[in-house]
């Protein structure tokens, strides 16, 4: 069973559809910083490896700060 690193979940299941979305202000900040780094690395530096690195870092942050799978399933 996986536990998260933070005391509260930054990301959680979406209300509609499949996947995760930011659940707290920390999740929104992490998402905004990653997208800004992604955009800057592609436009200013023209560095594809740095852009991919930004997305990998966001994926790791999401995995470490989300609820364990299986606990949030709800029937609509």
Image: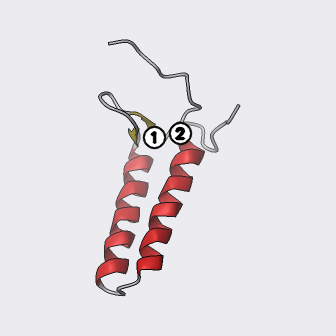
Q: Residues within 10 Å of mark 2 (few under 14, many from 20)?
A: many
For label 2, the residue is 66
In the rendered image, which quarter contains the C terminus? top left
Q: Earlier in the sequence, mark 2 or mark 1?
A: 1
Query: Residue shown at 56%/30% (left/top)?
Result: 69
For label 1, the residue is 11
Q: Is residue 36 left or right of residue 73?
A: left
Q: Are discs 2 and 1 less than 8 Å apart at CB?
A: yes
Q: Quadrant of residue 70?
A: top right
**x and y percentages locating residue 59 in the rendered image:** 50, 54
Query: Residue shown at 50%/70% (left/top)?
Result: 53
Q: Dot 1: what SS?
A: strand
Query: Residue shown at 37%/70% (left/top)?
Result: 38
Q: Is residue 43 left or right of residue 4?
A: left
Query: Residue shown at 48%/57% (left/top)?
Result: 58
Residue placed furthest toward the top? 75
**x and y percentages locating residue 16 in the rendered image:** 29, 28
**x and y percentages locating residue 45 in the rendered image:** 36, 87
Residue placed furthest toward the right? 1
**How many callouts does the rendering have?**
2
Q: Dot 2: what SS?
A: loop
**x and y percentages locating residue 26 in the rendered image:** 44, 49
């Amino acid at each position: 069973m996986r536990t998260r690193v933070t005391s509260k979940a930054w990301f959680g299941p979406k209300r509609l559809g499949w996947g995760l979305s930011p659940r707290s202000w920390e999740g929104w900040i992490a998402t905004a910083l990653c997208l800004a780094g992604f955009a800057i690395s592609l436009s200013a530096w023209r560095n594809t490896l740095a852009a991919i690195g930004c997305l990998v870092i966001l994926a790791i942050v999401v995995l470490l700060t989300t609820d364990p799978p299986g606990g949030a399933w709800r029937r609509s």
